[in-house]
Image: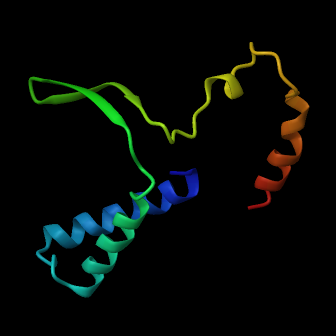
């Protein structure tokens, strides 16, 4: 799931929990949100390892064949064609938002 979809989903999740808490499970807006949230989960797959201890849940690890994270791409130690100056254009464009 990319960054923008995740941000929108977080907002929808808050509204969804409010509707469910107030008993509007069968309302049209709650049905709409269930469809949106379900659609956002279609490309999500993988495994999450958890630890449960004294009422707390801890994520021990996660892996997915569709992960957007690539350790080699984000590492400054791996040699590649990336130069830090390459980010200037991206930063300038995003600062216009």
How many numbered marks are there? 0
Can you tell which quarter of the image residue 10 is in? bottom left
Q: Is residue 77 left or right of residue 81?
A: left
Colour mapping: rainbow
> In this picture, is 13 found above or below 79?
below
Which quadrant does the C terminus fall into? bottom right
- The residue at the point 84 percent across, 38 percent down is 87
Which x, y percent locates residue 35? Answer: 33, 73
Which x, y percent locates residue 42? Answer: 41, 59
Q: Is residue 90 left or right of residue 13?
A: right
Seen from the viewer's position, the closer of residues 97 and 20 is 20
- The residue at the point 45 percent across, 54 percent down is 43
> In this picture, is 32 found above or below 82?
below
Can you tell which quarter of the image residue 94 is in? bottom right
> In this picture, is 16 found above or below 85?
below
Seen from the viewer's position, the closer of residues 83 and 17 is 83
Q: Is residue 74 left or right of residue 47?
A: right
Seen from the viewer's position, the closer of residues 24 and 61 is 61
- The residue at the point 51 percent across, 42 percent down is 66
- The residue at the point 43 percent across, 61 percent down is 40
Which x, y percent locates residue 70? Answer: 61, 30
Which residue is the extreme one toward the front?
65
Which x, y percent locates residue 17? Answer: 23, 64
Which residue is the extreme one toward the top?
77
């Amino acid at each position: 799931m990319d960054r923008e979809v995740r941000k929108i989903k977080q907002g929808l999740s808050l509204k969804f929990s409010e509707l469910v808490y107030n008993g509007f499970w069968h309302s049209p807006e709650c049905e709409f949100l269930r469809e949106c949230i379900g659609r956002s989960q279609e490309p999500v797959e993988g495994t999450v390892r958890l630890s449960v201890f004294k009422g707390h849940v801890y994520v021990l690890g996660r892996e997915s064949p569709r992960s957007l994270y690539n350790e080699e791409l984000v590492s400054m130690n791996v040699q590649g064609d990336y130069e830090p100056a390459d980010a200037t254009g991206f930063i300038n464009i995003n600062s216009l938002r």
